[in-house]
Amino acid sequence: MKSRIFVTLKNGVLDPQGKAIHHALEGLGFAGVSDVRAGRLIEIEHDENVSKADLEEMSRKLLANMVIENFEIESN
Amino acid sequence: MRAAVIQFPGSNCDRDMAVALRDVMGADTSLVWHRESELSDGLDFIAIPGGFSYGDYLRSGAMAARSPVMQAVIAAAGRGVPVLGVCNGFQILTEAGLLPGALMRNAGIRFVCRKVRLKVENSQSIFTSHYDADEEITIPVAHHDGNFFADEATLDRIEGEGRVAFRYAEPVNGSARDIAGILNDAGNVLGMMPHPERMIEAMQGGSDGRRLFQGVMEGLIREIA
């Protein structure tokens, strides 16, 4: 099985990297982009014994910093 | 007096820190590898040095904060042992939950490596007792992720409790309220981005960091006596 964990910055947390990417896109001539936020995608290969609760615990304990980030889990 | 400097793979200020503890504090200082799960009982002081532990993978300090030795550091901090985290050490202390907030990418994106002016906000802690409140000192920074973030309620709380130890006196990295260093609620854990161990004698271009270690030494001697 494979799960994808999306780690994103919470609303209200400034994202200097997203801002730099935004400026770079504008520099390349892409118009109409109003904001860019950068996050992280972590793919985890695991057996069927790893539950959603386990993945949530992994996210809370290590993969995301709950002070500044949120996470979403997508399993298939 | 016995001190430990914790070493992680990628620490690079561990030896400078050990020199500061030996020369300024006269401490019997040992370097402790992060795989150790115990620290000796009679330890008087713990330093978590700067560097790029685990190559800053995932987030600065994230992996190091989950190393076996950190459970022992958390326990020692709970017993009141003074713990100083500098630069990557500050990042590790926030990731380990010993200090609030997080250190994010510098607002200007660039790595900042230069001497900066700091204002001493709290001169009552064991780390800052040899400074005057509102005194301006000069200490170097060298970091990419020093942009301190915490929610407004947390910022108000740590300000209200006098837990801001140092503030930048010039623009450096976009830190919330120019915070450069904070204390835990008990006052025995200090995390700071600037490097006091790099300013302990004139040969290094200044000695404003020296008094931090002198303050700790005097505080510890008073405690033992």
Image (spheres, rainbow, N blue to C red):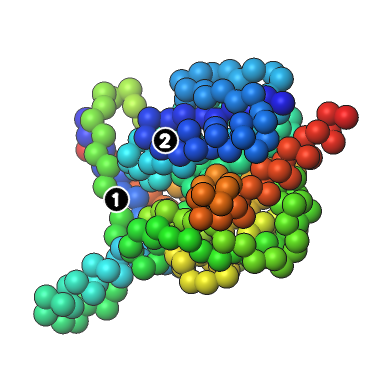
Residue extending furthest front?
A: B203
**Which residue is label 2 attached to?**
B11
Residue B75 image offset from top left, x and y in percent: 65, 28
In the displayed structure, would residue A22 be above or below residue B133? Answer: below
Give the Cα distance between marks 1 and 2: 25 Å
Q: What residue type is labelled 2?
A: Ser
Please state if A8 lies on the left or on the right of B91 as rendered.
left
Residue B68 image offset from top left, x and y in percent: 50, 23
Residue B47 image offset from top left, x and y in percent: 58, 35
Tell me which residue sits at (77%, 35%) in the image: B220
Q: Which of B206 and A50 is in front in this view?
A: B206
Picture quadrant of residue B131? bottom right
Single out the mark in the foreground, 1 or 2.
2
**Which residue is label 1 attached to?**
A40
Residue B76 appears anywhere in the view: no
Tell me which residue sits at (39%, 60%) in the image: B112
